Image (cartoon, grey):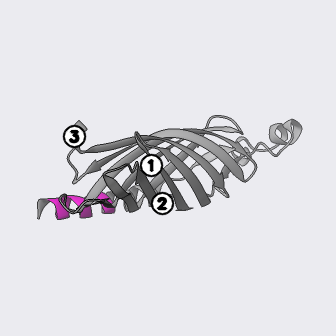
């Protein structure tokens, strides 16, 4: 019951926080003379975030690919994750589906940092070739954090970062899935 209440409160806090944010950045498309001749606040524009982010996940002894849809400050995403197979393991796949918040801050026209807070559902399935070992299934909820740094070129960008997913909201090393992420964004 406590986990359900905590999850609901976190989702509500993310929603309120994301709605309240207005990101202002310089309008780099204007020339120097037009910026100087206008009011000092007129060279600020609201940054509208929306688009798709394709990611590769460098997992220890595995891989992952995913897509995130960003609408304003909200993230909806799905990842497919895979592990190594060998003489014993025939199937080693999992996935994640999640919702969260995204905040991007531009240092310059092309350089930005970004942070994501995520909550979702994680599942993993391992099947063995012999009948002695039973099939293993994991179904967990998780809370994730992902700081990234990136370069933006017009409406597309590239980013690199790290991601920590804590299973069942247990914030310790034993329940953490961590990995390097590399992303290609369009329209964000």
On the question of residue 72 being in view, the answer is: no
Residue that badge 2 annotates: 75
Quarter of the image holding residue 6?
A: bottom left
- Relative to 148, is 140 above or below? below
Q: Quadrant of the C terminus?
A: bottom right
Q: Is residue 123 left or right of residue 1?
A: right
Name the magenta segment's main secondary structure.
helix
CB under 8 Å between callouts 2 and 3?
no
Please state which of residues 146 and 5 is positioned toward the viewer in this rendering.
Answer: 146
* Label disc, if present, on residue 174 of the rendered structure: 3
- The numbered mark, 2 or 1, whose residue comes first in the sequence reads 2
Q: Residue at image x 46%, y 62%?
A: 78
Picture quadrant of residue 31: top right
The mark closer to the camera, 1 or 3, is 3
Q: From the image, tell me which residue sits under label 1.
A: 116
Q: CA distance from mark 2 to mark 3?
A: 26 Å
Is residue 6 shown in magenta? Answer: yes
Residue at horizontal 45 percent and vertical 49 percent from the top: 116
Please name which of the two marks, 2 or 3, marks the residue nearer to the observer: 3
Tags 2 and 1 touching, CB below 8 Å: yes
Q: Is residue 121 magenta?
A: no
Out of 127 and 69, give the one closest to the viewer. 127
- First-in-chain label (2 vs 3): 2
Q: Residue at x 22, y 51 (%)?
A: 169
The one nearer the camera, 35 or 79, is 79
């Amino acid at each position: 019951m406590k986990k359900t209440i905590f999850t609901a409160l976190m989702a509500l806090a993310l929603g309120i926080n994301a709605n309240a944010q207005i990101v202002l950045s310089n309008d780099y498309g204007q020339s120097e003379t037009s910026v100087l001749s206008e009011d000092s606040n007129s060279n600020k524009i609201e940054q509208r975030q929306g688009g798709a982010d394709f990611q590769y996940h460098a997992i220890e002894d595995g891989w992952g690919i995913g897509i995130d849809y960003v609408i304003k400050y909200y993230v909806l995403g799905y990842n497919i994750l895979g592990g190594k197979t060998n003489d014993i393991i025939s199937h080693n796949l999992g996935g994640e589906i999640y919702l969260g918040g995204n905040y991007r801050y531009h240092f310059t026209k092309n350089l930005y940092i970004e942070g994501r807070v995520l909550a979702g559902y994680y599942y993993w399935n391992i099947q063995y070739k012999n009948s002695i070992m039973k099939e293993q299934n994991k179904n967990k909820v998780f809370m994730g954090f992902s700081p990234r740094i990136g370069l933006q070129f017009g409406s597309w960008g590239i980013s690199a970062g790290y991601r920590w997913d804590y299973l069942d909201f247990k914030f310790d090393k034993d329940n953490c899935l961590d990995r390097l992420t590399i992303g290609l964004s369009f329209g964000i």
